[in-house]
Amino acid sequence: MIAPSDLAHCREAIRTGSLSFHAASKLLPAKVRDPALALYAFCRLADDEVDEGNEKGRAVLDLQERLDLAYAGTPRNAPEDRAFAAIIEEFDMPRALPEALLEGLAWDAVERRYDTLSGVRDYSARVASAVGAMMCVLMRVRDADALARACDLGVAMQLTNIARDVGEDARAGRIYLPLEWMDDAGLTVDDFFADPQADPQVRRMVRRLLAEAQRLYIRSEAGIGVLPREARVGIFAARYIYAAIGTSVRRNAHDSITQRARTTKATKLALIGKSTVRAAGTLVLPKSPVIYAQPLDEVRFLVDAAAHPENGNRPRAAALLDVLAQLQQGDSGIAAE
């Protein structure tokens, strides 16, 4: 499937670029771990190009072209692209899933802000839950209830990221906190960017994000028990290692302005042990009724695309076309200058 040299490149990219995912991936069976590393390397490459580049719009348009080529079976001559094209062919990866990620990155490129928590969940669905749904596809899981819980986990992880990075984002001129929360706290975005402070109002917003993340972490666990047995330890580990970032933020009194939350190697090892115990429990305990909870409204399109591949390979959604057109106009303006 994936060429060994391409897989080795992807593995190295994850080893140096995403310590938490790399630690959890070691616990996955090889038949899931290898394509997961390739998938995550492509997604990480996409995120880094948009997040770190000077021309974010152009980076998104470049990623659009790379996706088009991969789905045409003629990927760009790069290890991540070749590996991703192999995944598309082997697993019948619905195009709507990576395109949801592309849309989230496009939102970053146009510096979209979100008025409500639902808007933040919309964003999280695209940049994180889409990856969770793709991971299910790699495990040959197309059950809608399991997919919904995987999407819960993705949103929880992204909310944790946002809570951890409030200060870092503010200093870079980005904000993912709901704007209505800022208004309720009597804060303006411009003033916050000019002088980000870990005042009680900001700490309260961080606490609210983590509370929502924790609710979804707990709900996501019901889905892990219906994944392939050999994959459960790795997914539990991803859940606990990421949640531990939130625990570290709480330990810092919800100050993610002057401090950056981290987890130690010892903590990761302890959580892997906990994950092993929890995964063993799924083999003997009855299925949790939480598995049947309705998906978040913001992730329903992902669940439908992954559960029904025939729905996931439709032409691009109008919303994505609109934001890509907006980026194309900006890119044309840059070229004309």
Image: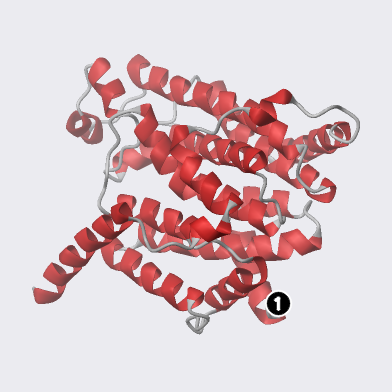
Q: Is residue 82 above or below residue 106?
A: below
For image coordinates 36% across by 23% down, the residue present is 198
Q: Residue furthest right?
A: 284
The image shows residue 256 at horizontal and vertical percentages of 44, 30
Residue 44 in sight from this viewpoint: no
Q: Is residue 302 above or below residue 187?
A: below
For image coordinates 32% across by 26% down, the residue present is 197
- For mark 1, give the secondary structure: loop
Q: Quadrant of residue 82?
A: bottom right
308 horizontally vs 316: left or right:
right
Considering depth in this image, is 323 or 305 the residue closer to the camera?
305
Q: Quadrant of residue 325?
A: bottom left
Q: Is residue 138 above or below residue 2?
A: above
Amino acid under disc 1: Met
Q: Which quadrant of the rendered structure holds the N terminus?
A: bottom right
Q: Residue furthest left?
A: 337
The image shows residue 223 at horizontal and vertical percentages of 70, 36
The image shows residue 313 at horizontal and vertical percentages of 48, 63
Q: Quadrant of residue 219?
A: top right
Residue on which disc 1 sits: 1
For image coordinates 35% across by 41% down, the residue present is 169
82 horizontally vs 55: left or right:
right
For image coordinates 26% across by 48% down, the residue present is 111
Q: Is residue 60 above or below residue 224?
A: below
Q: How many marks?
A: 1
Considering depth in this image, is 295 or 273 the residue closer to the camera?
295
Q: Which quadrant of the rendered structure holds the C terminus?
A: bottom left
Callout 1 crowding tier (Cα within 10 Å): few <14, some 14–19, many ≥20: few
The image shows residue 290 at horizontal and vertical percentages of 68, 25
Residue 335 in sight from this viewpoint: yes
